Image (cartoon, rainbow, N blue to C red):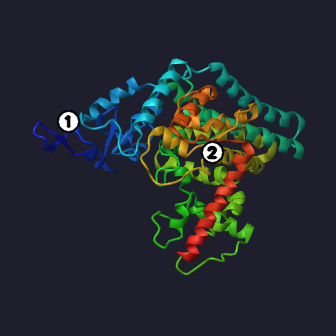
Amino acid sequence: MGGGGQLNDSGKVSNGQAGGVYTWEEVQSHNSRNDQWVVIDRKVYNVTQWAKRHPGGFRVLSHYAGEDATEAFAAFHINQKFVQKFMKPLLLGELAPTEPSHDRNKNAAVMRDFHALRTDAEKQGLFRTKPLFFFLHLGHIILLEAVAWLMLCYWGTSWTLTLLCSIMLSTAQSQAGWLQHDFGHLSVFKTSRWNHLMHHFVIGHLKGASASWWNHRHFQHHAKPNVYLKDPDINMVNVFVVGNVQPVEASSTEMIFNIHYDLVSVIFKLLLTLTLHVSFTVRHKKDQNWPYNYQHQYFFFVGPPLLIPIFFHFQIIKTMISRRYYVDIIWFLSFYIRYFYCYTPLYGPFGAMALLLFVRFLESHWFVWVTQMSHLPMEIDYEKHRDWLTMQLQSTCNIEQSFFNDWFSGHLNFQIEHHLFPTMPRHSYHLVAPQVHALCEKHGIPYQTKTLWQGFADVVTSLKSSGQLWLDAYLYK
């Protein structure tokens, strides 16, 4: 627990206690793993011990330690009054009257206007769910899976039907991925309990993954998107370097990242060596990193094909076992029991496993391209302590709206609106988008929208650019 201090009547600093008054300088000093304070609506909380019990994971709170977390708190919680009962024991006091409500580089005018926009969106009913939308979405997933299995039962397991079944199952898996994303963000039901239950069902029973693993990883991404050391989605330095800063640092002998070559990295390296026969023309005695200048080429072999079937799968199993997520393990096993019960009589155990790996292979391509096109080409840098709107817009872009794009991406073509309002039902994104765009224009914040194909192309272009930066720094630093 952080001891801290407060300003007493004489203006001196004394030990922190409930009812204290604090300065931003003092709050910012409590930002270590074993001493974490946050500010929400000018109230100062010590979350050091609570972080271990936080439903979104302890790292989300640690990313905001010593900072104002008001906007993030509003974005992630659907029932703030309910959460308040857990926060009361953590309350230390409040900011001194002379202290501003925001810290560091945050723009007060932007924060005020964004708060007004969120309030208007709530009044317009944009946070209210249309149950039929999600019921039909779940229905079409179950229908795809049922038809794929019945087709094989009645017409056999020819190569043509097996390929068609694989496409149908990978489509169902991808769409289930978008649906579990909705439940995981608490954007379907009014209560967290039902959202969590359905999240376990969809991600666990329908997809064979872990809800807790997803929560702890994904909320970090939303809290600090494209921020080095805080967003796990850009911590890929074992295989890729991204942005403009990481490539230069990866070229140095004294790297700030804790690089370790685990099993997944070894698999990647073996696959790259065996399939591409890449010549390590820039290898030097001082370093034996990946040939990142080729990353825009080997991305097609180790990124989309392997993220879900190898990296995520290995990480999910390791996390569930090491952290003893027993409920997740039960849901996880229920998927595989159901799958092998249905497909082993048709293909045998090895054939059923091969079919599942191929489905994961197809699904992984779908997932990688959709998720990376809105973030990878955007700004990637260290923490800059920006306000919520600015931070999300600098790291996120949209893809043009169409019926296909909406369905194909699970409405994550409205990535900007999703990041600004993660608990908003996705069927409302297109309604709030013009208001967000207008607010961005008012404050001179770039609001980017691309075509689907441009989004795909920019993923490769950004990897090529970062790889070239690494090569230049490696050879000439």
Q: Where does label 2 land, which residue? A: 374
Q: How far across and how far down the image is residue 378, in percent?
A: 59, 50
Q: Residue at x 71, y 62 (%)?
A: 297
Q: How far across and how far down the image is residue 136, in percent?
A: 70, 23
Identify the residue at the far left of this view.
10
Element on which disc 1 rests: strand
Q: Amino acid at mark 1?
A: Gly
Q: Is residue 30 above or below residue 471?
A: above
Q: Residue at x 50, y 71 (%)?
A: 252
Tell whether 299 sits left or right of 191: right
- From the viewer's side, name the closer residue of 332 and 75: 75
**Is the residue under label 1 in contact with that under label 2 (CB below 8 Å)?**
no
Q: Amino acid at mark 2?
A: Ser
Q: Is residue 284 above or below residue 344?
A: below
Q: Where does label 1 land, which residue? A: 20
Element on which disc 2 rests: loop
Instruction: Locate residue 441: give its quadrant.
Output: top right
Identify the residue at the far bottom of this view.
285
Category of crowding for the residue at label 2, using alpha-carbon neighbours closer than 10 angstroms: few (below 14), some (14–19), many (at least 20):
many
- From the viewer's side, name the closer residue of 114 and 281: 114
Q: Is residue 59 in view? A: yes
Q: How far across and how far down the image is residue 192, in percent?
A: 48, 27
